[in-house]
Image (spheres, coloured by chain):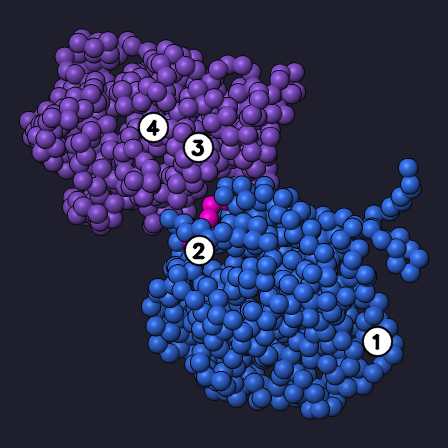
Amino acid sequence: MNKYERNIGFNDYFSPAQWFDPKETLESKVKRAKEQLDLHVRDTVAWHFSPETGTPFWLEKAKSYQFNPIKDVQCFEDLHLFGTFEDEWLRGGPVDRWVPRGLIGNPVYVFETGGTTGLPKSRIVLDDFRIDYEMMSETLPDQHFPKGSNWLMLGPSGPRRLRLAIEHLAQHRGGKCFSIDLDPRWVVKLIKMRQIEMANLYKEHAIDQALAILAGGHDIKCMFTTPKLLAALDEALRSGKLEDKFRSFGRKVPLGGLRSIKATGITGIFSGGTEFTPQFTREAYEEMLDSGDVYMTPTYGNTLMGLACSRPIGPHDGFKITYYAPQPRAATEVVDPKDYSKKVDYGQTGRVLLTTLTREFFVPRFPERDEGEREMPYERYPWDGVSGVRTFSELAATTVVGVY
Amino acid sequence: MIRIPSLRLGKPYESLSKTTLVHHVTGEPVAEVSQVTGSQIIRDISQMANARRELASIPMKELIARVKEAAKIFLEDTLECGNTSQNFEDYIRTLSSTTGSPMVFCRRNAAKVGYVMGNIDEILAGLTRGMDLAILDKGHSKQDGRTLCFYPTTDALGAILPSNSPGVHSLWVPAIALKIPLVIKPGREEPWTPYRLLMAMKKAKIPSSALNFLPTDHGGAADILRGCQRSLLFGDSATTDPYKSDHRVEIHGPGYSKVLLGSDTSAQFDNYLDLLVESVAANGGRSCINASAIYTHSHGKELAEALGKRLARIQARSWDNAEAEVSAFANPDVADRISGMIDGLLATPGAEDVCQRIRGTPRVYKEGRCAWLLPSVILCDSPEHPLANKEFLFPYVSVIQCPQEEMLARIGPSLVVSAFTGDPEFTQQLLDSRLVERLNIGPISTVRLSWDQPHEGNLFTHLYRQRAFAEASL
């Protein structure tokens, strides 16, 4: 039993290392992964719908079902019985309706998404962010993310899971995390008001905080950031702003200067955001990260799912970014936008349908705001992936994304 | 398929992100254009101080000779165009194919750009009012016994360019001769002219690092305007309004150019019909120097009828027809939207599309996947009518009868005003007006420009500032 099981009877931590054996064939891994997923579907549904451990929201919902979730849902495909999850259900309180009875009494975090207009969507979390990031930690190469090293969290703060998750990742790997203040809701407001200059000033303010941390002698080696902030940090470094910061703190600028991300001592970057295009990735690799000397791993995630890791990126693959959900805790499907029951063929474009299956949170078949291409299973992630993730074209005109 | 790279510090860069340009008639893909990101743009702009130093090290005399050589190359040579090469005719054909602008317009406008480069000394003399250009080699000099000293306001000129007419490129090409590198964002459908111009400059030994061709999205355009200390921005009001109070950005928005017929000429409007037609419809009516309003002291209705009759003869013709007079819209929805807007505003009483009535057919003409907008002459009963001061991408003009004494209070800001008058008092009032960028007194078309006089901003004063200077020997 791992430290998060809390004596609840089913496993909720799945080490990615179980797929690392190069001797096992992909076919065998795919079969094993599907069996694991189906078992986890049964465990999760039984947990959320049993009167002893179940989640008030789902127990109430079940009263209107023409099926018995515990009996009739035996495999992943059976989840279609739930229809699709509506994220509107997450707006407003009481959030207690999302806390499974089996977990009552434990400390609960509330994380929010969006929130620039109206009621934000809320999600309760106990340990999921820790589990997700510990699983992800197993996939990070130690030579670029050295154990014990300190992290810079150059991303959103506030009621977001990401902020705590990165701090936990740093601690889990034996380091400490230094953070900035960044309110993306304010940035969205500025953009909607067409206050572009002010939005740029706010970005500079965020970068200035990061420079102060980098100049503070904290021996930062790892960083989380977003594509936009990575580019902004690179711009600031190239224009000598970190060197200026060193001087303003009375510190000596090291020989060779501090005009690149590599020169700051950062060796590994964990980055996230849907605006990760192959072109941006190539630019980052070639022009910001010294042709891969600084390692970057893009991820795709959100408060509902956790995070999906990508295959290693680089020129060998045309900088294509293919994400794989942390199955079986979450699974993504690429489906026909007009019929969510139909997966598109490999290589074809469809909408991303997300399912989250954890002890804390059950989200069956949620249509994400993104689209992408369906990808084949891969040695280390022997299940379907999704590449080319971008805002779903029907929503693109009305959605403000990637503001930080 | 032609693959056009971006040019970063003059070096071709093929991006993983591309836009596809299609033939406006067939819809077939013609070219893929490599797109760069805003952060790449900012990174390249950070190199412009070095690029400017390299360019500035070339003596003016030599630089002018190289720009003149580039003009010749632009007009005559076969030049690399991504994965292929193009002679001048190939260039004209592809330019027309993606913009919908007839080949005859493309050729005429390209010749204008070639003329500006080929006569760059005359153009610079106009911009600097005859200053000895050698001053820019050293930064200061004496001329007519007076000390003159200028310093550059920027390390690069950014230019956010349109797709509607290649003639606009004549406005930024002098920057190179003024020793200022270029950071160009081409219009989406018109990468052809800027790319060919830069390739011609490269062949004429202009330093590559000064030649940046950076196709990008709106965010990237904003990064050019943010990163360059001086820029030119072409676009409609929605694009240009956020930069109205940014002195670093010279805005080239709608022109609202006009013809005024005074009390001494309005009764003889017939004598000026050719000039009015030219002012409204030359170059397909797409330029900011095309007249979009005619104010006449009298005979408004008669003038509108006569002009409507002349303009109603204009027909939609194919892009490769030498008689073509109006451009096609590569995206037919745009033509529908413009026409719909005009019809909506015609619902306000007091205006009529005289030209449409005379022609007897709607202003939108469609054939295959193309659409054209045929001329509109809107007779308005008052300068307050919402169609009295509008400008569109086709031969559109409003005709307003208005007493001469009230005209200057009514016309609003105007890029070009051609006032057909011999009245000294009216002439003086026009000369005193702060509303007019270029003023023509007498029977002169609004589209006739004199190259030795800048008509919309002055590139030299945009790129250089004068300062007081003194020097003493140690």
Q: Is residue B51 above or below residue A212?
A: below
The CA span between labels 1 and 2 is 51 Å
Q: Quadrant of residue B305?
A: bottom right
Q: Quadrant of residue B239?
A: bottom right
- Amino acid type at mark 3: Leu
Q: Which of B113 and A169 lies nearest the eye of the viewer?
A: B113
- Amino acid type at mark 4: Thr
Q: Which residue is mark 2?
A: B5
> Would residue B181 be found to the left or right of residue A65 on screen?
right
Q: Which residue is mark 4?
A: A303
* Neighbours of disc 2 within 10 Å: few (<14), some (14-19), many (20+): many
The CA span between labels 3 and 1 is 64 Å
- Amino acid type at mark 1: Thr
Quarter occupied by the N terminus of chain B = bottom left
* Disc 2 chain ID: B
Is the residue at mark 3 from the same chain as the one at mark 2? no
- Magenta stretch, main secondary structure, is loop
Q: Which residues are magenta?
A: B34-38
Q: Quadrant of residue B200?
A: bottom right
> What residue is shown at x 66% (from left), y 83% (from top)?
B276
The CA span between labels 2 and 4 is 39 Å
- Amino acid type at mark 2: Pro
The CA span between labels 1 and 4 is 69 Å
Image disc number at residue B427? 1
What's the colour of chain B in the image? blue
